[in-house]
Image: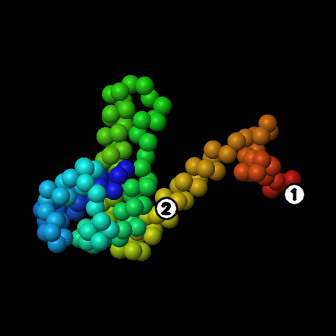
Amino acid sequence: MEIGEVVKLLRKQAGYTQEKVAMNIPGYDGANLSRFERGRQSIDLDKLKIIAATLNMSLSDIFAIAESDIPYLQTGKSDPKQINSDQSQLSTELNELISHYTRADQRGRDSILSIARIQNDKLLIKNLPKSHDGDALTPTGSKRKKANNQ
């Protein structure tokens, strides 16, 4: 996801208009912010810092959200209606998650990220390749020792 798209999403989650956010930036207006959100205009780091502060976010939060882009079309589904439905559901869930994240204090944000990391680790472990006898292989390919065989 592009930075401008993230800003637009966060701005809307916060209930701000483009004009309200832009009024905090000297020499900037709603039209400039609109062009930035649509990827038609770049923005310097100082202005982006002001936008982040206005949205009660850090620059690292905004960049982290942008970097966590989910490849919507790699769903394995061929029916465009199903893909659109999945995207809509995912978009709703992401908006809800971002909303909770942006309203949380730093401790809450850390907790949300910890839960996401734990879930990701569980998924990685679940998807480890299986050996011929059903034991999960470690990432290096060697079998884990069974507790009853030690």
Residue annotated with mark 2: 115
Q: Position of residue 21 (x, y in %)?
A: 18, 65
In-image side of 36 versus 67 (left or right): left
What is the distance, in whole Å, between disc 2 and disc 1 at their CAs? 32 Å
Query: Dot 1 corresponds to which residue?
Result: 150
Q: Amino acid at mark 1?
A: Gln
Q: How many marks?
A: 2
Residue located 36% across and 44% down the image: 90
Residue 147: horizontal and vertical position, in percent?
80, 56
Residue at 35% over, 74% down: 105
User: Which residue is at the front of the view, 49 or 62?
Assistant: 49
Is residue 133 visible from the viewing direction of this image? Answer: yes
Of residues 148 and 98, the one nearer the viewer is 98
Left or right side of 98 for 148: right
Secondary structure at numbered mark 1: loop
Mark 1 Cα-neighbour bin, 10 Å: few <14, some 14–19, many ≥20: few
Badge 2 element: helix
* Depicted 71 relative to depicted 96: above or below: above
Structural crowding at the residue carrying mark 2, measured as other residues with C-alpha within 10 Å and reported as few (<14), some (14–19) or many (≥20): few
Q: Quadrant of residue 25?
A: bottom left
Instruction: Choose between 97 and 60: the one closer to the eye.
Output: 60
Query: Mark 2: which amino acid?
Result: Ile
Residue 146 in the image: above or below residue 26: above
Does residue 10 show up? no
